[in-house]
Structure formats: structure tokens, C-alpha cells
Image: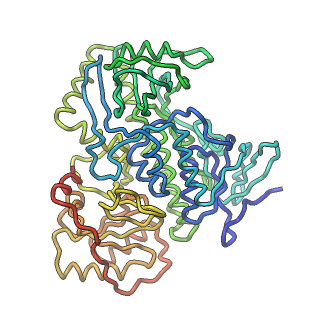
Amino acid sequence: MTIPLREGPGGRRPVLVVGAGPVGLVLATELLSQGVPVRLIDNSAAGPVQHSRASVVWPRSLELLGRIGAAQGVVDAGNRLDSVQYYSDKRAIGAIEMSRLTDTPYPFGVVIPQDTTEEVIRTRLAAYGGEIEFGTLTGLDTSGARPVAEVEDAEGRVEQIEADWVIGADGARSAVRELAGIELLGTGNDVLFAIGDGPVDGDMDPHSLVYCYSRTGALGIAPFGNGQFRLAISVPDWDKEQGPPRELFQHFLDERSPRPGLVGKLDWSTIFRARRRVAETMRAGRVFLAGDAAHVFSAAGAQGMNTGIQDAVNLAWKLAGVVGGLFEPGILDTYDSDRHLAAERIVLTTAKQTSWGLFKRRHEIAARDGALRLASRTGLLQRFGGPLMAQHDVSYRPAESLRDTLPGLTRKVRAGDRLPVFAAHGTPQKGAERWPSVDPARLSLLLWAGERQDSGWVADREALTAAAPEDVCVRDISAWPGFAPLLGKDPKAVLVRPDGHIAALTAPEPAEVRSALRRAGSTFKAVARPVRTVPAPAQPAPAAHEVEELAS
């Protein structure tokens, strides 16, 4: 017998999320925060998986976790990461200062065990009324109008569960992906890394992610705080059943690290196989993939879990909008187009970082080290490397190839780019008051006067406000001069998605704005509102030097 999922208000079937790692937890919490009933199953629902691999949460992920009130918990429980340092044969060749990022409430990364990150998000899931059930997906029938999942519980009982949507956030060996018949595609040879967590006694940098290159391979060092570190070393092969011993990590730390340290008893160690794979599609009908189920790549740059969190938020606001009638169903097609190219680009950049660390020929090493030194001296490493690490440079510009997604030399934003505006379903994010807020579930219309701070602009603003549908938040951001380098001198209407990416940049004319709203998937359920005045923000505008920092 097929058992429908517990139905929410209005008789809607909820979403079935398979996998309660960080990505599944964020997805479920986001959906619940927007009133979408969710059933979240995992085959290890008793608690977070101990000693999991992801260890760094970057600024963009903190911004997105702030939507569900989880960012501050992660910051408080982790260790602040202020820089990324690069060494070759124990000599410094470059650095990225995360603390110099000025367009975010989180100008730093956080080094934190994945199981601790999961505990923080679980708390937020529970706050929204969510729970995790033990269940193993054993079958998935997508032949009918709605997918039917076969789930086995802890006692061996099997349910046939029907849902409107099924989301696979169940890791690199995803049962959802396999049962949905979606291939994981990729090229390139796998690279093995020995990974271990434990104490290191010595003069280690407590707030830097350190990459150490040598002719024998690469070493990565991430500080958890209190003398605990994550060590990752490239190894040519490994055929033993047990994890790598402390002595192996000590050997490569002595050989590659610019600072001496004594490795203590390891809490945990394993072999990680760095692969380059992206799912052929991240959507098949009513089935979606997110996180490692959709893409697997090198550990270089610690981008894996962070990429999955972006998947989760991108999918959640679109799916919640469709379920709630705010967006046309076609907007769900943009999940694959948005995130597929983003994943392919991160696969490429992390593969390049991995290969650079494994150079053995003298001319390759000399070219790499020379390029990094030059980029560091000229500021290019900071200019492009900071947003790359932070994942601030992820863009959803219309693109036919990876080249179209590359950031330009100008700071001006285009449709698809991230704008420094922030959202939260509850209490606003700490530190985000320096920037305008946007609606976490609906489109927001931000009005930019440029140099036209006059009565004509006031009239245009009132006309635009009147033309916008009732469920579109309208805000005049002209009092934030820090946006001038991003938006320019001319008046603009900026249509912003719930995740802070620009849906459209148009002339400040009602017809243009309504056309942009339709293209963005708005359902136009409500009629236009009467004219109303949008006041300038109550907080003082940033000082001149702060404006320059925002643009840097």
C-alpha cells in the first residue's frame, strides 16, 4: 500500500528529503521556515556522523546559514579563519586575507568539525518543528504523476511513500541519484589524500588555512582551535584497511610545513579520494539532487560542503515559492542551469588547485611559485582569490560555457551576480545592518537613484512602487553610497532574488520592471498597490572610508 506523506495545510503533500547531512538539514530547515511541510530521512538519524570530512565554512555559506539563524552558532562553536597562506618548499609565496573582505558580515572563514556544524543546524531544524527519521531509501518509482519512494525503517518495515518532490542530499554514493537513473560524469584521474584530525604541539598558525607545496606533494593545515588541527596530505597510493597512522602525518609535516610541530594521538584518520564528477542533471522531473549527490570534487579550497549549502538555498526558495504560489513552476528549471555551471566551475578551480600542489618538474614549480608571488605583490591574488575562496564570485549570469561565468575586471554587477544584501526568516543577521535587507522568500525590488537625488526621482520611485505587485518588497537603497561602484551613476531598478543574486537590472520604468518580474517567474497574483512612499533607511549612511572599503 502506498502511504502518502503527512500532509500540511491545504492538503499539500510535503517534500521528501533524503539525507540529513549539512545540505539536507539546510534544505529541510529552509523549506520549513517558508511553511512547506518536509519529511527528512537518514539512515543514521540517531545523531551527526562523527569525524566527517568538511571542516571549513566560508563567508558565503555563513551568509546563507544566517537566513535560518544558524550562522552565529557556527561562528561561536568554530575557530575564526583570517587568511589562506601558500608556501613552496617552506617559503611563503602568497596569501589571501579573508579579513579584507568588506562586503559581508562575515569577513572570515570558520574551521569547525562537520558534526558540530550539523548539531547547530539540527537545533534550527527543531526550532521550526522539523525532525529526522531513520530510513533507508531502497526504491524510487518516478513513472507516475508523483514519485513514490520505498523506505525501510530501523525495524525492517517498508513504506511506499508518495511525495510531491524528492530531494537527494544523500552524499556521493547517492541512492536517489542511482534510482533516478542520473549519471555522475567527469574526467581526470583520482587523487588520494590522507586526512587526520588531532593535536599538533608547536608554533602552528592558529587562524590561517595553510597550503604547503613541495616536490613530494602537498600538505594542508586547518586549525580547529585549542591546538587541534586538520591535516591533509597527498599520498601516491594506499591499500591498507586501517586509516593512516600518526607517523605518516608527522613525516610529511616535518618535510613540508614551514613551522615545526609534533603530531599527537589522532582522533581520526582516513583516505579521501579526490574526484571530479558532476551529475548529468541536477533535476529529473520531480526529483532533485543537491550537495555531494550532485557533484564531487577535490578537497582543495574546502569548497564541497559550502557548494552544497548554496545548492540547498537555491533550490529551497524556488521550491517553496512554487508550492506557495509565489512563482511559476518553470522557475524550478533554473535550479539545474544555475547550479550545474557553478558546480562545473568549482570542479575546475579545485582540480587546478590540486594539480598545482602536485607539480614535480622544476619549470612547473618555478612557474607556479613565480605566478603566485607576482599575483600576491600586485594584489591580483587578493582581488580574485578572496571572492573565489569566499564563494562570493559565484554568478548565475546567462552562460553557454564556463568562460561566461568568470568574473570581469570591473566591479559593476550584472544580472546573476551576488549583491551584498542579506535576508533572514527571523531575527536579522548580526552585522548585516550595514547593508539593505531583502525578503528571504520573495523577489525584492531595490531602487537606485544614482546621481539623481531630486524630486524627479521621488516621482519615479512612487510610480515604481505603485506598479509592483503586492508580494514584491520595494526598497530605495540610494542612501547606501557604497553601492555606487557596483551600480554606477545612472538610476536603476534592481530585481533581487531571495538568495541575494540579481534577477534583473532595468531602467526605473514601471513597464520594464513588470516585464522583468514576469521573466523572473513572478505569478502576479496580486494587483498593483496604491502609491506609497518608501522612506530612506533609518541608520546613518556609511562614512566615506567605509564606502571605499565596500568597493574594494
The answer to whether residue 492 shows anywhere in this view is no
Q: Which residue is the extreme one toward the bottom?
A: 530
Which quadrant: the N terminus?
A: bottom right
Closer to the camera, 14 or 329?
14
Residue 360 at what x, y percent from top left?
Answer: 34, 15
Residue 60 at what x, y percent from top left?
Answer: 39, 48
Residue 514 at what x, y percent from top left?
Answer: 38, 75
Q: Quadrant of residue 531?
A: bottom left
The answer to whether residue 277 shows anywhere in this view is yes
Residue 54 at what x, y percent from top left?
Answer: 49, 36
Residue pictured at 20% horizontal, 63% vertical: 481
Q: Is 545 positioned to the left or the right of 134 in the image?
A: left
Q: Quadrant of residue 369?
A: top left
Residue pictured at 27% horizontal, 32% vertical: 95
Residue pictured at 32% horizontal, 38% vertical: 82
93 is higher (above) or lower (below) than 319 = above
146 is higher (above) or lower (below) than 80 = below
211 is higher (above) or lower (below) than 548 = above
